[in-house]
Amino acid sequence: MPFAEVVVDLAADAVDRRFTYRIPDDLPVSVGDMVSAPFGPRTLEGFVVSVKDEPGMDESRVRPLKGVAAAGVILPELIELAEWMKKRYNCLFVDALRLMIPSEMRGARVKEKNVRVAALSMPVDEAAKACARAPKQLELLSHLTGGAKPTAYLAQMVPGAAAAIQAMAKKGVLTLSETRERRAPRMDDGGRSREDPALMPGQQRAADEMISALRSGGGRFLLHGVTGSGKTEVYIRLIRAVLADGKGAIVLVPEIALTPQMVGWFHARFGADAAVIHSRLSAGERFDEWERIRRGEARVVIGARSAVFAPVEKLGAVIVDEEHEGAYQSEKRPRYDAREIAWRRCETNGGVLVLGSATPSIASYMRVMPGVKPQNRLTLLELTERVLGRKMPECHVVDMRRELEMGNHGIFSAELVKELRACTESGKQTMLFINRRGHSTFVSCRACGHVEKCAFCDVAMTYHQSDGRMHCHYCGQSKEPPTTCPECGSSFIKYFGAGTQRVEEEVRKLLPGVPVARMDVDTTQGKDGHLKLLEAFRKGETRVMVGTQMIAKGLDFPNVTLVGVVAADTTLNLPDYRSAERTFQLITQVAGRAGRADSPGRVVIQTYTPDHYAIRCAVKQDYRTFYHTEAGYRKRALYPPYTVLARLVVLSKDERIPALTAMALEQKLTEALTNEGLMDGVLLIHAAEAPIKKLRGETRWQVYVKMYARGEVERITAEMEKLAETGAPGARIEMEVNPANMI
């Protein structure tokens, strides 16, 4: 008699284990099925993680399964991956398993969509005779001559069609049946060629080496190509080889904004073999795309972070485009890193992992250096020139301190104004980058200096001109701006700084009549919001695009010849050890949007710190110098990737609790690690306020731990997790390893 080990779909430490159930004789059950299982007085859904012949306990205590909710929803490989994630990320087994399926499947919230279809069951002339005395039936007949139609469609075309359809069915004129309808996401290839272009020598060498690795048991590559060097074409050639070998591939992009363009490329080349998964799809679209992948109908998956769990059997390659992006690391439990998951899946399947970027992360690039252990090593492949010999854009740095000295208090430097006008007059397009949403970055009193802050977060509120209100970009709270200062009563209220709305407004004033669009979180909230904006820009309906980091990477618009970086220092002053790295990446990436076709590109970078090495190297597109400079700083300061950084974050509505709890945690952790003999692997344990002390109504303190003994990291973080799970009265404790966001 077979037995199933089931992980019930209940997120609680006490039940996060395997429970044994008897499989009834008349119930076919396999590993990966989602089943209905008795659990105490309730019936819960659960995931079958193994099937065995013996229960391993008193058989009389083993209860039978009640049914199968969905068969084969999780691949055995992904069950093993979930087990690995439980250990790697100190998460619940069930939390990891939930990532493997669309959330809509749990509780059968979304199912296959079936539609009723009508089709003629006799020749048209015979049908016409049978319906000759019924005008409405004849009208329906005219819609059915071209083939079967959904009855819902017929009801729209012919008012009162329902009765006529039934009458025709009784006569035998038509037959009614149920058929599955695919809820397909929009996949526009944008008129792109379906033919593979000839590759440049560097592209061909990179593709050949990847394909060779594919056919010899797998490999791991860092594809470092300058912006516009044709990395996507290399990806496509690899995927062609993957498909030829009867395998599948996953392509990850960091931003949903990049998904439509990448989908367009891949849809043009692979047609119905391409599927897309991301959070902006409707529940039905996401379910149907996932089903296509599971059934093997689509073997190329494009999507954001969660697409790394797509149920692709015989996985031949995983490509992580713009691998340097922090978006690949989840900030919610389980706090997984999609790059690590991709590495693991390729290792399991003997597939090829490709990390691609013009600005690789310091951590990834370090893996190509001499001395790295073989199991951790990446093979470096470089594309050093743009396709078709196109030149890199010409970059100019404007020192905004000098602009102020010359009496220019505006957003735009004299040079950027000149270039904007010249670009517009020539019929070309411009992209303006500023990493701030809204109209003004803060509202302040000129008399006393009071700054309007969010009541729930320790941050200044941002003024949005579109609705005339101040917004908190962390918790979403909004309120009317004050007319008088709440501190001193002064009416001298001023709006400082500039966000995307303000830049858009200034461009409209500078270039009256020129179509301008803004791409940020506020303008892309609706379904297909990104796609509509990008399509309008691609067609030339928009001449100037103002945007945040959404426009800073991956996008390819041939008519863009000018890029303006309005405030290059925004990310440079963040309280994060990666601030220089992120500044270099953003400037390099956004500069790379210019001059990607035959017309040369120009970039104007406005900054108050023109001599900073991140900006100097970005201007020259000099990654290697930046890497060695930044890596030197990291090594001296003992920051990742030379160490591992973990933190316990204490959060509470009571502003007094976090400080006391954090200091107590520091002491407890020191004692626990000392008792376990682990303190030799720790460089620092320190309790302090979080950079943003208050967030979404909760006061935050954190305990930082720096570790350098990598062999002991899992043991040290396990001790930290124990403390986090223990909690504290009136507070909750979260744990993160190498957090994507230090704020």
Image (cartoon, rainbow, N blue to C red):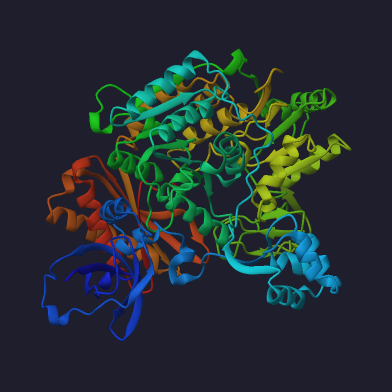
As drawn, the residue found furthest toward the right would be: 513
Residue 180: name its quadrant.
bottom right
Q: Nearer the viewer, residue 133 or 471?
A: 133
Q: Horizontal placement of 307 versus 370: left or right?
A: right
Viewer can see residue 448: no
Q: Nearer the viewer, residue 307 or 594?
A: 307
Q: Is residue 398 above or below residue 180?
A: above
Q: Quadrant of the N terminus?
A: bottom left
Q: Residue at x 67, y 56 (%)?
A: 526
Q: Position of residue 646 (x, y in %)?
A: 32, 49
Residue 451 vs residue 318: left or right? right
Instruction: Give the residue drawn at x 36%, y 26%.
Output: 632
Q: Nearer the viewer, residue 411 or 107?
A: 107
Report x, y in % for residue 627: 42, 25
Q: Residue at x 22, y 74 (%)?
A: 21
- Looking at the image, which residue is at 34% across and 83% down? 42
8 left or right of 463 in image: left
Q: Residue furthest bottom?
A: 41
Q: Position of residue 549 (x, y in %)?
A: 60, 40
Q: Is residue 208 visible?
A: yes
Q: Position of residue 242 (x, y in %)?
A: 41, 33
